[in-house]
Image (cartoon, coloured by chain):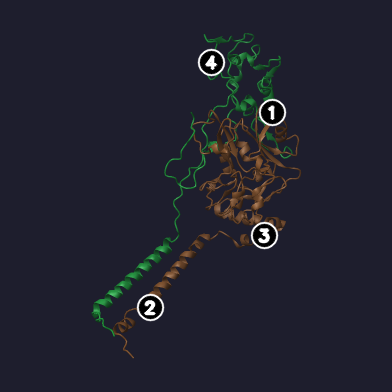
Chain colours: A brown, B green
């Protein structure tokens, strides 16, 4: 029965009440927070098309589906980089199993292979993604703990050191394939372990499982200068990746599956890199494994059985 | 009940209204700021300079006689008898330490074939009887465009590996049914007078993902 206080009276009539002010502020703040939380969507404009979102698993794609997928990828690349690529879905060849041999006596650590690989495989320039890491090791040891990969002397090779480039070893028994929860990475019949970039969920289990630090993750949107795009692309190979997926060396599928040598081999100035079909007894790699002092598969004691062999001359 | 004195009417109202107006304008300003430039800014990425195109080149750094013939380039350097006389082998001169003296006409030649002076003799390979050919130790005479057997006469295992494709750079096609592999001759990579491959600056190493304050340490630089 008490009379409304003059203060309440005043505020309810003329000014805003405390409650409605708080309610208004909360509503406004809530809306702002919602908008802020949705703001990343504005950057997604041409990120995931419906076609890409609904795309089936690589192994379930019919040839017709594949044609459509390739068209979609070509369109995406053209929109993003202004260049019409030639994307192919290359299948493994019959009677071919690839093996890589690297001559540690010859390697001078010039890192040309690293950059030829980046250019060939449309790897992000910033943040930098490189499939090959060249380790500098002191003579007389193979202790990877002593390896230095940031060496920058005036000239190479340096006295007292040897150089060991490490990239995906294309294991016969690949731990990365075993841990993938969605089968987005698998081993093909020619020995290349491939990744379906559209199926990868970016969990990075494979990166953790790989004993060779061969897999790279796209933490950010890859950045490739438009004039540096290599238009000769393969679905499982060097087509541009997106943020949040894994990638790694695939023995240059777009080259090797049409009979060419990988880019890192062609650029090697000292001929330290040898590549070929191990099932062909006449091939260079067969000759090397038969005749040369092939001394390691890297970390062979862990049973991954790499298809990448390091050897010495003499 | 209400013991508080009613606030002086006009001034309190005005203050409340001013506060509310101020807050509203503040929120509106923040909204405008968010809408105009709302995305969260990551720390600026460290700039990574593009790699020098010379590191991507796949051509060998030397041209052999065969390459010059193919490219129809000037072969006058190989025309020995434009200066030398036929049937008169040019003599080799030595200094006091039995090191070979290179005549000034051949100043571009640096001798450094192996570690022993006996390897730095012109007529180990060149044929003094016919300067436009090579001579192999076993008496064979080879033309300028047929170098590998000459080198192979001393470097047997290397020659064997080269023939099998295991020594030397390659390129082109591993699958010979699809195309040709690029084969290079000894002199495409090795200077026959000083065959050791010279050292060179390495291509830039990996950059760290995040900007670092201090320059990356460079341990084990050349002693």
Looking at the figure, which quarter contains the N terminus of chain A?
bottom left
Q: Nearer the viewer, mark 2 or mark 3?
A: 2
Q: Are marks 4 and 2 on the same chain?
A: no
Residue on which the image places disc 2: A19
Q: Secondary structure at mark 3?
A: loop
Is B16 above or below relative to B168? Answer: below
Q: CA distance from mark 1 to mark 3?
A: 48 Å
Looking at the figure, which quarter contains the C terminus of chain A?
top right
Q: Secondary structure at mark 1?
A: helix
Residue closest to the eye, B191 or A167: A167
Q: Which mark is residue B106?
A: none
Left or right relative to B39: residue A2: left
Q: Are the residues flagged by discs 4 and 1 in contact, CB closer than 8 Å?
A: no
User: Residue, x 35% and y 71% (percent of image)?
Assistant: B24
Q: Dot 3 surroundings within 10 Å: few (below 14), some, or many (20 or more)?
A: some
Q: CA distance from mark 4 to mark 1?
A: 36 Å
Mark 4 or 1, nearer chain start: 4
Q: Are the residues flagged by discs 1 and 3 in contact, CB closer than 8 Å?
A: no
Residue on which the image places disc 4: B105
Q: CA distance from mark 2 to mark 1?
A: 89 Å
Q: Secondary structure at mark 4?
A: helix
What is the x, y in percent for residue A3?
31, 89
Residue on which the image places disc 1: B161
Q: Which mark is residue A56?
A: 3
Left or right relative to A30: residue A137: right
Residue closest to the eye, A299 or A307: A299
Chain under label 2?
Answer: A
Residue A281 visible in the picture = yes
Residue B72 visible in the picture = no
Is B159 above or below relative to A142? Answer: above
Q: CA distance from mark 4 to mark 3?
A: 72 Å
């Amino acid at each position: 029965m008490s009379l409304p206080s003059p203060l309440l009276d005043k505020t309810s009539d003329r000014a805003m009440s405390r409650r409605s002010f708080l309610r208004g502020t909360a509503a406004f703040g809530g809306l702002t927070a919602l908008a802020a939380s949705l703001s990343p969507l504005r950057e997604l404009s041409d990120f995931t098309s419906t076609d890409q979102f609904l795309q089936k698993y690589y192994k379930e794609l019919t040839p017709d589906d594949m044609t459509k997928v390739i068209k979609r990828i070509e369109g995406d690349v053209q929109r993003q980089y202004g260049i019409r690529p030639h994307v192919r879905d290359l299948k493994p060849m019959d009677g071919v199993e690839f093996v890589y041999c690297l001559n540690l006596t010859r390697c001078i650590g010039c890192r040309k292979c690293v950059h030829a690989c980046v250019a060939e495989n449309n790897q992000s320039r910033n943040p930098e993604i490189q499939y090959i890491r060249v380790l500098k090791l002191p003579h007389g040891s193979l202790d990877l703990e002593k390896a230095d990969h940031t060496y920058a002397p005036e000239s190479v090779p340096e006295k007292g050191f040897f150089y060991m480039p490490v990239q995906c070893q294309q294991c016969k028994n690949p731990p990365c394939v075993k841990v993938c929860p969605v089968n987005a990475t698998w081993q093909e019949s020619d020995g290349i372990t491939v990744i379906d970039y559209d199926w990868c969920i970016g969990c990075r289990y494979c990166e953790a499982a790989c004993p060779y630090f061969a897999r790279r993750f796209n933490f950010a949107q890859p950045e490739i200068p438009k004039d540096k795009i290599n238009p000769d692309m393969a679905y499982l190979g060097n087509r541009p990746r997106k943020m949040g997926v894994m990638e790694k060396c695939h023995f240059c599928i777009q080259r090797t599956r049409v009979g060419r040598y990988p880019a890192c081999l062609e650029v090697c100035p000292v001929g330290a890199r040898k590549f070929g079909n191990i099932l062909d007894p006449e091939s260079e790699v067969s000759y090397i494994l038969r005749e040369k002092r092939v001394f390691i598969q890297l970390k062979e004691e862990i049973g991954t059985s790499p298809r990448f062999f390091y050897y010495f001359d003499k | 009940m209400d013991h508080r004195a009613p606030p002086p009417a006009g001034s309190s109202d005005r203050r409340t209204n001013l506060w509310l107006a101020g807050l509203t304008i503040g929120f509106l300003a923040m909204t405008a700021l968010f809408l105009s430039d709302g995305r969260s800014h990551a720390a600026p990425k460290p700039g990574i300079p593009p790699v020098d195109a010379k590191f991507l080149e796949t051509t060998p750094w030397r041209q052999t006689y065969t390459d010059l013939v193919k490219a129809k380039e000037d072969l006058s350097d190989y025309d020995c008898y434009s200066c030398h006389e036929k049937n008169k082998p040019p003599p080799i001169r030595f200094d006091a330490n039995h090191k070979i003296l290179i005549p000034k006409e051949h100043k571009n030649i640096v001798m450094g074939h192996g570690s022993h002076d006996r390897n730095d003799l012109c007529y180990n390979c060149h044929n003094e009887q016919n300067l436009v050919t090579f001579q192999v130790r076993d008496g064979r005479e080879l033309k300028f465009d047929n170098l590998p057997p000459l080198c192979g006469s001393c470097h047997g295992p290397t020659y064997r590996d080269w023939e099998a494709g295991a020594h030397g750079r390659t390129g082109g096609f591993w699958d010979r049914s699809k195309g040709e592999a690029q084969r290079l001759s000894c002199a495409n990579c090795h200077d026959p007078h000083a065959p050791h491959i010279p050292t060179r600056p390495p291509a830039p190493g990996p950059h760290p993902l995040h900007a670092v304050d201090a320059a990356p340490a460079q341990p084990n630089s050349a002693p």
